Structures are given as structure tokens and as C-alpha cells.
């Protein structure tokens, strides 16, 4: 009888599962090393920073490794993008640039030259267009770029006779045009009194950055 009870107890005891080994912690990803600033001396003057350049008239350096320095119209022109453009580079890997025409110089992204004028966007997500012989450039607010990053929708410009506006959901009527400032914004025209109403919902995103992406090479 006892052997039968022992067999029954042994059969009712749940099997002991083998202990699974603890997985190793994921490898720590070290931030990419940042370029080291340098100093340049020319004509008795010294400037320090990044991508330093000199000309017969001056010398200058960018303040960050994401900036640019170019010699145009005999002078060194340096420009650094805003932090929001640094933290959220575009998919097109657009780089800042400087352009000059008739002694005028502008630096930024997507620079355009037209009819003796030059203008640029301050971020790679802006738009520049011409209207009645003048350049018009517009960039989305920083909150929009923080929210959408490299998927930031492209804004557009709409004109109505001599008026022009840039942004999102643009509407125009009788020489007047208005746009929302964010992709979720809306603009409407009251059919009775032909009045514009535009609304942009506030961004509730909290954007916290630790390390910026590596700067472009070159």
C-alpha cells in the first residue's frame, strides 16, 4: 500500500522547471564624440570655434560644429542653425549654406536668390518662394518641429493678389490670405461677412533631449 501512495504523491508533485539564466544588460551606447574646436590666427587677429575661415578683411568661426562659414563678397560669413534644427535634422540631410548677390549675404537653409535679393530659411523645414519680385520665407514654429521631428509636414505659401501668407491650411478670398501656424491648425472663412478665423491647438509635447545627433562631416 505504501509504495502505491508514494507513487501517487510523486505523480501529483509539479515538475521543477529549470532556472532560466538572467539575460545580460544591454550594451551601453556611448554618445558620438563631438568635434573639437580650433583657433585660427590671421592678420594679427585670432578667432576660435568651428570651421574657421579667413579672408583679406576678417576671420570668423561657427559657434557649433553644425554651423557653416563661407567667404562671400570678400568677407567671412558664419551662421549656426537654431537648436531645434540641430536636434531634429531633416531626412534630406540638408546643410546650412550662405549665398550672396550684389553685396547682400544670407545664411540658413534652402537659400534662394531672386531679382537682386537673397533669403534663407532658419530650419530645413521651411519654405521660400517669390512673390511680386520679392522673396518670402517662412519656418514652422519650434514646437511643431519638436513634435513631428523629421516628419514635419511641409508648409506652403498662398497668394491672393498682392497678399501672401505661408503655413498650413491656407485660405484666401478677395485679396486677403491667412494660414494656420501648425499642421493641426485650421482656417475658416465666414460665409456671411467673409471674415477669417484661424486656430492652432497648443502642443502638449514635452521634448527632452540628451545628446544631439552627430554633426555632418565636411
Image (cartoon, rainbow, N blue to C red):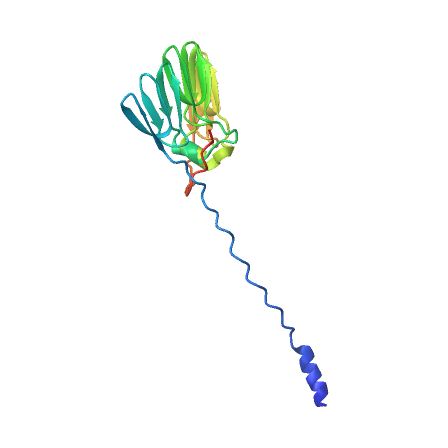
Taking depth in this image into account, of 195 and 177 the one nearest to the observer is 177
Residue drawn 44% across and 14% down?
113
Q: Is residue 3 left or right of residue 90?
A: right
Residue drawn 63% across and 69% down?
17
Residue 14: tell me if it is visible: yes
Quadrant of the image for the N terminus?
Answer: bottom right
Q: Total label count?
A: 0
Q: Is residue 190 above or below residue 11?
A: above
The residue most toward the bottom is: 1
Q: Is residue 59 above or below residue 28?
A: above
Q: Is residue 35 above or below residue 172?
A: below
Percent from the top left, x then y, of residue 194?
Answer: 44, 19
Q: Is residue 84 left or right of residue 58?
A: right
Residue drawn 46% across and 37% down?
214
Taking depth in this image into account, of 177 and 151 the one nearest to the observer is 151
Residue 194: tell me if it is visible: no
Q: Determine the image quadrant of residue 141.
A: top left
Taking depth in this image into account, of 160 and 36 the one nearest to the observer is 36
Q: Is residue 83 left or right of residue 155?
A: left
Percent from the top left, x then y, of residue 88?
Answer: 46, 35
Percent from the top left, x then y, of residue 51?
Answer: 39, 28
Taking depth in this image into account, of 146 and 85 the one nearest to the observer is 85
Amino acid at each position: 500500500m505504501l509504495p502505491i501512495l508514494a507513487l501517487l504523491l510523486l505523480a501529483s508533485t509539479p515538475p521543477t522547471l529549470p532556472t532560466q539564466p538572467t539575460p545580460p544588460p544591454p550594451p551601453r551606447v556611448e554618445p558620438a564624440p563631438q568635434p573639437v574646436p580650433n583657433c585660427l590666427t590671421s592678420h594679427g587677429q585670432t578667432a576660435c570655434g568651428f570651421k574657421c575661415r579667413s579672408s583679406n578683411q576678417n576671420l570668423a568661426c561657427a559657434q557649433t560644429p553644425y554651423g557653416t562659414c563661407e567667404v562671400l563678397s570678400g568677407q567671412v560669413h558664419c551662421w549656426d542653425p537654431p537648436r531645434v534644427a540641430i536636434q531634429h535634422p531633416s531626412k534630406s540631410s540638408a546643410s546650412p549654406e550662405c549665398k550672396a548677390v550684389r553685396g547682400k549675404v544670407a545664411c540658413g537653409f534652402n537659400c534662394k536668390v531672386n531679382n537682386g535679393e537673397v533669403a534663407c530659411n532658419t530650419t530645413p523645414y521651411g519654405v521660400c518662394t517669390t512673390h511680386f519680385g520679392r522673396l518670402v520665407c517662412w519656418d514652422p514654429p519650434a514646437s511643431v518641429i519638436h513634435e513631428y521631428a523629421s516628419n514635419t509636414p511641409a508648409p506652403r505659401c498662398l497668394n491672393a493678389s498682392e497678399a501672401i501668407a505661408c503655413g498650413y491650411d491656407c485660405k484666401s478670398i478677395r485679396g486677403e490670405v491667412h494660414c494656420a501656424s501648425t499642421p493641426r491648425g485650421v482656417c475658416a472663412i465666414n460665409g456671411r461677412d467673409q471674415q477669417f478665423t484661424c486656430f492652432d491647438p497648443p502642443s502638449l509635447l514635452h521634448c527632452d533631449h540628451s545628446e544631439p545627433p552627430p554633426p555632418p562631416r565636411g
